[in-house]
Image (cartoon, helix red, strand yellow):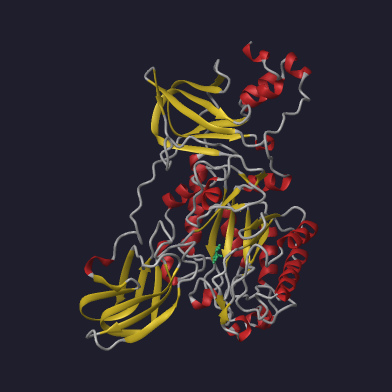
Amino acid sequence: MNALKFPLPLLMALLPFTALAFLLTTACAQAQVSTQPIPCGPVPSENQLRWQDMEMYAFIHYSLNTYTDEEWGFGNEKLEMFNPSDLDCRQWARVCKQAGMKGIIFTAKHHCGFCMWPSAYTEYSVKNTPWKNGKGDVVRELADACRKEGLKFAVYLSPWDRNHPDYGKPEYITYFRNQLRELLTQYGDIFEVWFDGANGGDGWYGGANETRRIDGKTYYKWAETFRMIRELQPNAVIWNDGGDRGDLRWVGTEAGNVGETNWSLLNEEGEVTWPMLHYGLEDGDSWVPGETNTSIRPGWFYHDAENAHVKSLSKLMDTYYKSVGRNSTLLLNFPVAPNGRIHPNDSLRGIAFNKMIHEVFKDDLAKKAKISRADDNATFVIDFKKPVTFNRFVAEEDIRYGQRVKKFSLEAEVDGRWQPLKDELAENGDGLTTIGHRRIVCFPRVTATCLRFRVIDSKCNPMIKRTSVFLAPELTADIPDSGEKKSSNLHIFFSNSKQMMIDYDQERTVTAFRYLPPQDTRDGLITHYTLWVSNDWQEWRKVASGEFSNIVNNPIWQTIKFPSPVRAKILRFEADRLAEGERMGYEDVEVVGE
Ligand code: FUL
């Protein structure tokens, strides 16, 4: 038997589970069975391994923004607004569970500073709202609901606080840690702590109403805060998007995908650039796996206007393949509606998503096949014995010993001839790079008698834990909703680099203006705007001005609703601030009328 020429660790590395089980029963294998494989480069901690196995968990965004129709609150929103008629954390937990989520991360405090629990350190919390006469605690209700539904619970605590007077001063860090201590000591086990790096500068700040910029790397003194987390919640993983490296990394986009090449590594020190976030760092010195966060609808918070834009099933499946299927986890957001419940459009779609995942992966076609290792060291041949139709291939590395595989190939034997398969979701080449915890390769249906999986390049000997093959049902293509151009009937021109004129022939009643920013660049992306209307090009009336919150990370359609409908023939859209560059950019605009 060929295999006996190799030491056991190497053999374990090369063989799939089924073959391994066979090998371990042979006399030769028994003699060496206690030998531990040697790790290859950085390896995950127990916490990171447990976290990675969760695969999918939910975000829940709910705060005062839910009542102002905003994505980022300014910090002076009225507490009276928080009085949900039907708040039901059990419903959130049930929906998330049925959607296949293993836990929930809750926005205990978003950037507006409003605390969803009665913190002892601020008056800006549920305790001063009419909801339950100030006796309520959303964090408690959700933590309890999660436990009842068998879900894990975690918290999002925004470092940026647009309400707090001390934000920007050293005193604020004490406040922030006091709040974190409350969350880490009063609500049972927390599986993850989420610190958002966003800071748009301006805020209410106790009435100062000004712009406060901080250095995210030094201001929050993360090392000390991390020590506190390790002590109070030793099993929690830390997600940190600014400053010191946490246990997990952002994947550089909120669109719901990580690179098809995805190393769970980064360097402990030094600058982290966008490609490092998106693809990891092949030679990184630390294990920092990527978490793919995205929302089930365009925004993170609930907006009535998005009820028809909940992501389609095929979009969600695409997200799954580009996150869990690319060695990442999926953190999928469900916003809570003003009544205090997850909207039925989101819950039904979430549940359908989970059903579809089960449908796709219910029958491993490789189970009935004969899996053998060919003469080459890292080649697996899955012999179905008869023609079998499939379109998904899954490989998993035993990441306890590091992430090893750099490149692999897949070939199907059709009518006696081997033909290469390529990842149809790949951005580059054939897309067959890196495996990690789980790699799902999607390709058009093929009917073949054999499938050949070959590790072409690997850091150390590959340790493949499992290989499987599936036939996913075809999903019909989506009709784009917000993707189509809306501006076709408008005359648009620029009177200068930061001023767009929109003329629509005749006077109309206008209720809103919508802006879709450039999609692949920050250059020209408008963060602050002013909007004017006119009927004659002479007299201009200002109808709105403000900020497009979170537009840089999530460049979705932005809607400026007018305080009351206006009659106008021309709109003037001014860019007061750009994320980058000198010239305003747009992908599309829309004038909404009666
Ligand atoms: C972003 C925030 O600014 C958004 O509001 C949201 O919370 C998202 C998850 O992270 O950076």
Residue 150: give x, y in percent of width and height: 68, 54
Nearest to the observer: residue 546 or residue 499:
499
Position of 477 relative to 577 (above/below): above
Q: Quick check: can you spot residue 287?
A: yes
Q: Pick out the residue farthest to the bottom.
A: 539
Count of labels shown? 0
Q: Quadrant of residue 368?
A: top right
Q: In this view, does 481 lie to the left or right of 153?
A: left
Position of 329 relative to 569 (above/below): above
Instruction: Please state, as top left, top right, bottom left or bottom right, where the C terminus lies in the image.
Output: bottom left
Residue 447: give x, y in percent of width and height: 39, 27
Residue 385: give x, y in percent of width and height: 47, 19
Residue shown at the point (39%, 41%) measured from the top left: 474
Q: In which quarter of the image is residue 573?
A: bottom left
Q: Quadrant of ligand 1?
A: bottom right
Residue 232: give x, y in percent of width and height: 79, 60
Position of 235 relative to 436 (above/below): below
Instruction: Please state, as top left, top right, bottom left or bottom right, where the N terminus lies in the image.
Output: top right
Q: Is residue 44 left or right of residue 434?
A: right
Residue shown at the point (36%, 69%) measured from the top left: 515
